[in-house]
Image (cartoon, rainbow, N blue to C red):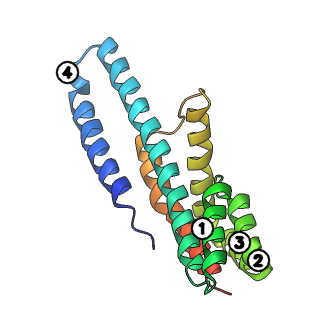
Amino acid sequence: MPTLLRIDAALSTCGSHIEDLKKQAPFVDAATLSKHAELENYLVSFLVGAIYAEFEQYVRKVILERCEEIPDRGLKTFARNAVEKTVKKIKIGDLAGHLGYFDISCKEAFSRAVNDPLRSQEKAAYDSLIIDRHGFAHSTGASMTFDEVRKAYHASVFVLDEFEKALSLT
């Protein structure tokens, strides 16, 4: 299971700030409550952007670690450079595509795992974070609440676990 300390720390800090705002709610006017909601939205927007960035870095990291197994120094250098240039998207379909470059069995194992009906909540959580990040990045803003982001983050780590497992199959 990946440990993303930066995200864990950000969730803790933002959660503390949001809790402080909620404690003030009974004692403030409507205008201040509106500002509190706006502030939560900004924190959520930051978090979904940071989570996306950490997920992207994690995917690159595990692929680069796999590339370290290549004995040919020139080929290894080429692979490292290719990873930095090509691993830019991390939707579930993109992750499956990256795995397919290693071997179709990697792609199929990953697809089976993330499409397992028993894991549909984890897949939906991952999709929600990626979609919300795209919304934030393309000016429509974040649509999730802090609690939704926190829960989705913890559930969606499953997708990264399965990506790493599938990558190690060949």
Residue 77 image point, x, y percent: 60, 71
Q: Earlier in the sequence, mark 1 or mark 4?
A: 4
Tag 1 residue: 80
**30 left or right of 16 in image:** right
Question: Mark 1 falls on what kind of element?
Answer: helix
**107 left or right of 69 in image:** right
Among the 4 quarters of the image, the one containing residue 32: top left
* Residue at 62% over, 44% down: 131
Q: Is residue 91 visible?
A: no
Which amino acid, by three-letter code, is at mark 4? Phe
Which quarter of the image is occupied by the N terminus? Answer: bottom left
Marks 2 and 1 close (CB-CB < 8 Å): no
Q: Give the CA separation, mark 4 to mark 3.
A: 53 Å
Tag 2 residue: 108
Tag 4 residue: 27
Which amino acid, by three-letter code, is at mark 2? Glu
Question: Mark 2 falls on what kind of element?
Answer: helix
* Residue at 47% over, 55% down: 54
Mark 4 nearby-residue class (10 Å; few <14, some 14–19, many ≥20): few
Question: Mark 4 falls on what kind of element?
Answer: helix
Which amino acid, by three-letter code, is at mark 3? Leu
Q: Earlier in the sequence, mark 2 or mark 4?
A: 4
Tag 3 residue: 99
Nearer the camera: disc 4 or disc 3? 3
Question: Mark number for residue 21?
Answer: none
Which quarter of the image is occupied by the C terminus? Answer: bottom right
